[in-house]
Amino acid sequence: MAGAKGYSSYRGRGPRWKILLAVVLVVVIAVALSVVYLGEHVVYSADGRRQIVLPWQREERDAPPDGEEEDPDQPDVSVTVQEPEEQEPREIAAGSLPAKALTAADWTAWSGETENKDFNAVAVRLKTSNGTIYFNFTGAVSGAVETELDTASTLSALTSREGLHTIASVACLQDFKAANADVEGRGQKNTGGYIFYDGNNSQWLDPSKPAAREYLCGLAAEIAALGVDEILVTDLSYPTEGKVHKIDYNGDGPIEENLAQLLRELRAVLEPLGVTLSVELPESVVSLGFDEISGQKLSVIAPLVDRVYSVTAADRIEALSSAVAAVSESTVFVPELPAGTPTEQLTGMFLLLPAEG
């Protein structure tokens, strides 16, 4: 009898291959999942053999029963990550270039000398105690700048040399050119109201005057822009020769504070630029602590600078280093040694002075 219209009442079995295909797919999927799962639990023994350790087996290995020793074939393996040790900065071993407008010939001759091969730093004089400036300082007074045609390019080559620490030596307050150019604003006066002449007939800047400090800070900023690593300030003092009792100190405050204020302002200029600020002091000031005439007081100056330099002999280094450390633990003492001093046995920083003549 016929079924409903359009449909057959017979429902036979589907093709057998479809059933087999479904079974195969299920098996493949199961195997793939097993491989992925077991792959997460593959470990290697000490001799390099692979084995599968399931989570419940791992717990048993991690915590063996009391009184039982762990399997010697499964040693504990721990990984230690060793942080790289911070390397101490290399001690500065510095030589000195001639005190003159630098030329390429000067630099080539100096760097080519055998005795200069071991230096990793060099000092170059950029301002002398008579006020002469050996680079193109835009704020210089008339007649102060002396340069050669290749001075700028030579200074650039010097400061950009890889691995070379460059020190700019700068005479600070002894400066008859800048003092005479503006006696009222910058010059050190005597009690009579005139420019003060020291025992060498030279004139000085007055550190108590803002214009004098501004001039020196502007100079330091432009030297830093040359790319030097360190500025070594010399002549940071009041005059010590001549009729010093007639010096007008421009106030009743302690004169060492005037020097300290200049250093604070210099540091404010140089510190953001990453330039080291150093000062040269007489050996007597470092060892005794104070010079009432010059206004140099070690306990005031040392904490304001990174390094204190002093012309001395090798056998005095330890004592002077201790004197500086006693007033400022963060300040380093650097000896300035005469040219020709044997340096093989020196262990700390040093600056070898240029040969005379």
Image (cartoon, helix red, strand yellow):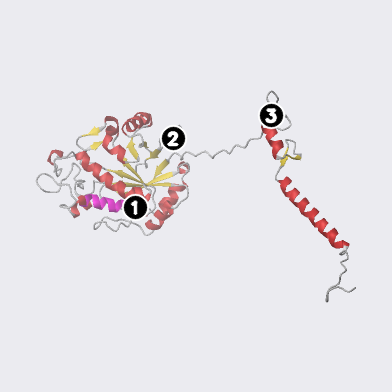
Residue at coordinates 30% horizontally, 41% vertically from top-left? 304
Q: Are marks 2 and 3 in contact (CB under 8 Å)?
A: no
Q: Are marks 3 and 1 in contact (CB under 8 Å)?
A: no
Question: Within the image, what quadrant is residue 282 found in?
Answer: top left
**Quadrant position of the N terminus in the picture:** bottom right
* Mark number, residue 204: none
| Secondary element at image label 1 | helix
* Mark number, residue 64: 3
Query: Nearest the camera: 35 or 276?
Result: 35
- Magenta range is 211-224
- Amino acid type at image mark 1: Ile
Q: Which residue is mark 1?
A: 223
Question: Within the image, what quadrant is residue 151 found in?
Answer: bottom left
Residue at coordinates 33% horizontally, 49% vertically from top-left? 270
Q: Residues within 10 Å of mark 1 (few under 14, many from 20)?
A: many
| Secondary element at image label 3 | loop
Query: How far apart, in angstroms, are the residues tagged by discs 2 and 3?
Result: 64 Å
Query: How far apart, in angstroms, are the residues tagged by discs 2 and 1?
Result: 29 Å
**Magenta span: helix, strand or loop, mainly?**
helix
Query: How far apart, in angstroms, are the residues tagged by discs 3 and 1?
Result: 71 Å
Of tags 2 and 3, the one toward the viewer is 3
Residue 260 within the segment the image draws in magenta: no
Task: Estimate the x, y position of residue 161 in percent, counting from the top left.
Answer: 46, 51
- Amino acid type at image mark 2: Thr
